Image (cartoon, rainbow, N blue to C red):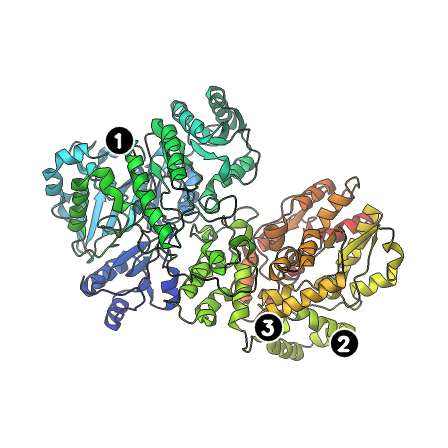
Amino acid sequence: MAEQHRPHTGPSPAFVAALRSAVRGESDFGATARSLMTMDASNYRRVPLGVLAPRDADDIAAALTVCQEYGVPVVPRGGGTSIAGQATGTGLVLDLTRHLRAIVDLDPAARTATVQPGVILDDLRAAAAPHGLTFGPDPSTHSRCTLGGMIGNNSCGAHSVAWGTTADNVRGLSVVRYGGEALRLEQGAGASAGPHGVRTGRTIGPEGVRAGRTIGPEGVRELIRAHLALLRTGYPDLPRRISGYALDALLPEHPGGPDPVRAFCGSEGTLAVVTEATVRLVEAPRARALAVLGYADEAAAAEAAPGLLPYRPLTVEGMAADLVREPAGLPRGAAWLFVETGGATPAEAKAHAERILRGADAVDGAVVTDPAGQRALWRIREDAAGTATRMPDGSEAWPGWEDCAVPPARLGPYLRDFRALLARHGLRGTPYGHFGDGCIHVRIDFDLLTPAGVSRFRRFSEELADLVVAHGGSLSGEHGDGQARAELLPRMYGDELVSLFGAFKDLWDPDGGLNPGILARPAPLDAHLRFEVLPRRPVDVEFGYPQDGGDFAGAVRRCVGVAKCRTEQAPGASVMCPSFRVTGEEAHSTRGRARLLHEMLAGEVITDGWRSTEVRDALDLCLSCKGCRSDCPVGVDMATYKAEFLHHHYRGRLRPAAHYALGRLPQWLRLVGPLARPLNSLARLGPLAALAKRLAGIAPERTIPVLATETYSRWLRRRHGTGTHVLSSGKVVHLWADTFTEYLSPQVGRAAVRVLEEATGRTVLPPPPGGVCCGLTYVSTGQLDAARRVMRRTLDRVGPLSGHPVVVLEPSCAATLRTDLPELLPDDPRAAELASSVRTFAQYLEEYAPDWTPPRLDRPVVGQTHCHQHAVLGDAAERRLRERMGLTGELSGGCCGLAGNFGFEKGHWEVSVACAEEQLLPSVRESEPDAELLADGFSCRTQLDQLAGRRARHLAEVIAEGLDGGR
């Protein structure tokens, strides 16, 4: 290489100038862009020089030409979900997801599609679905992985027993070598009969197609001819042999002749960069059913899997009980097989699944035909890559031996030996995966933080590699070798064949500029570990982080990069990650923010710690919706991390105006409450309102909410007095008078009192003198010292609860009391007591008025489940209550976009509106005329009022009206 760089240094000015003059795409060599690309979903970290988002194939060729001239390595990158480290590097990262997203052609008759490398798999599947077609390989990251990345890793997925690997489903590739030369690799005419037919490729240059066929760059054919015997005998016969280069695909006796496409798939970005791919589509079953089979243990399930293959299922997936945190409706057993079947009709698919159920020697089993039920079960399996990163006791587990594959008939014995090997090393893991193909995924609780732990990681890796080979297996059965396993390939293939891999790489990439250190001549498996740069001592922080041992670095380590937050359409009730879905920017995803926090702690690229403007700007568009707390498979809680960061970032410094105005909203509302009438009038005067919003840092597009002329507590005291006369009887309801109910929507409190007293026969107590506040607005703006003061004062006022539940009407306040309160005051037992006492309105009615019959309303509903309720509290009780009332239909997921102070803050208007347009507003526009518009959160109701011109109501208001016999 002509130019070498330390990871923390930047590129030469000459290189940057040459690159920017040669390409049209955006290049970024700043700290934020580099930090976002330091890691993929593996254990590894390498700091790049910069990031380029090429606009087209010409940009890629130009960039590779400039990079060769300046000796800068290149790392092609798709969704960044690689688990072996192959999407990290020290050179220029090509971000192929920003512009190269086109489905160039889709031919239903030929059952092919031509796509650019940045196409998301689910987008291709959605485009093919109207024609009854799909792309067969479907890794669990299908909602965010790219076709280019799948080709690079030869990805597989759950349906490989039916449709094979990515290599089985690629017909042709347009690629560009380091230095800018373009090649076209194609399968031959025989491919129409199946995935193995081949036609040799044609070399393509800027002037067009040249005469002559090729199986790659000059010298490849001669290399193959010189080593025929080695190539014919050196590869195990496996359905999931992903390790190494597939040079045996270039043998002359390969069906249809040498197959350069198959040989290229799985090359992990080390040979050339894909610019376009023509892929095979398969017929998608019109109906599907799922046979779920329970077994005594995982080895029994593994031994049963090969016997199900003659039934020609679509999947044979396995997992054990130690991966399932909740029963989730699974049949009896300690391990399960998920066996999917297809058919032209639901009855046919069901009959197929029932035949498998009858033929399987299972402890228990069930056939699931309901699509929602199937999705729920598959979600358990798809989230496993994240769920498995935490052991049941909360300790961390890591990839590294994520996808070994053995012959399916050997899977049961292999799993027993694997468990024994874990025990000998004192390690734990939770195997799961593609049992029908003999491929096992597992995260293991390696200690990758200490030298002794890393040494054990190496010893275990070496012994496991030998074990896999002893069972006739492949070190990688799906995700590629990368840095995690490539060092050990000689144990699988022998030194001679591995040296041939290096020769093959050199013919394609003689300068060694494409993804160096990956696959061929790899870096050691214990080098570049992403944890080694983190601080060894706990960082001084404010929150307790009970799930991470009080360690902020441990909390940040939670993000393993599976990138579920990068899903561009929220499925069902999912919330995460609204800012990424509306911006499409990695920096505004949960993963991107976690990466920046990681680099902030590392201090190499982001060097100013808590004062970092890079982290501040990325967190600025975090809505603090808490969606990641529940939707992220590993429970990253970016809302808490944001509050922590803001606290340190602004400590001792002037804050944005909105922090003083909106962050201290309860304080201001208590002061101005008596002046509600004149202030409401003044707020409707345009010039005065504009001045007030400018001074308060409020978006000029926003309307200032109307203050209540009579607060909830004043109304309740006028109605009940002090309530001391009922305290002794115990027949009381503790209703939390949150700031929003008290000053902005007291009608919700009045309705709740009406319903609670009717349903329970108890009396709602007035709030204590001085009022209560959960501290939400202080937390969301990172004013954590003030939040603690407010919380302690509230605990003093509330006093001992003596086991009484507390009904909280505002979901965001309930979530704050449930989570932030005990995490900010971990040493105050009153905080934990209050947190455990919190109930939502529907939860309280279900628990304390189980025999009460709510009014039957029989009409459709539309609206949104509050994101904090979704993430922290759950909405099962609300769903059951709506069902009892005859309120039909589903509330939308996502986030309303107002999210407390977020949507009011200057600079957030566009993102706030875009979030509302993602699910909420379309569902309201498309609703039936008589639909009830429900939104329990004040923010959600305000957003609907200001953007849709519709008044939404809390569920308590709807029930109260029903009790009064009106609408």
Q: How many marks?
A: 3
Residue 162 in sight in this render: no
Identified at 87% across, 54% down, the residue is 726
Classify mark 2: helix, strand or loop. helix
In the image, residue 359 above or below residue 736? above
Q: Foreground residue, 450 or 869?
A: 450
Q: Residue at x 57, y 34 (%)?
A: 329
Q: Amino acid at mark 2?
A: Pro
Report which residue position mark 2 lands on: 678
Q: Is residue 42 above or below residue 406?
A: below
Question: Mark 3 falls on what kind of element?
Answer: helix
Mark 3 vs 2, N-terminal side: 3
Report whether 616 appears left or right of 446. Answer: right
Q: From the viewer's perspective, is the residue at label 3 or at label 1 nearer?
A: 1
Mark 1: secondary structure: loop
Q: CA distance from mark 3 to mark 1?
A: 64 Å
Residue 112 image position (x, y, % from top left)? 33, 40
Residue 747: percent from left, percent from top:
77, 59
Residue 429, horizontal then vertical, whole percent: 43, 41
Residue 407 seen: yes
Q: From the viewer's perspective, tell me whether residue 706 is left or right of residue 110.
A: right
Estimate the spatial distance between the alpha carbons at disc 3 and disc 2, rounded to whole Å.
23 Å
Residue receiving disc 3:
658
166 and 114: which is toward the camera: 166
Q: What's the residue type where badge 1 is placed?
A: Asp
Depth-wise, is mark 3 or mark 2 nearer the camera?
3
Q: In the rendered view, would you say 9 is above or below 152?
A: below
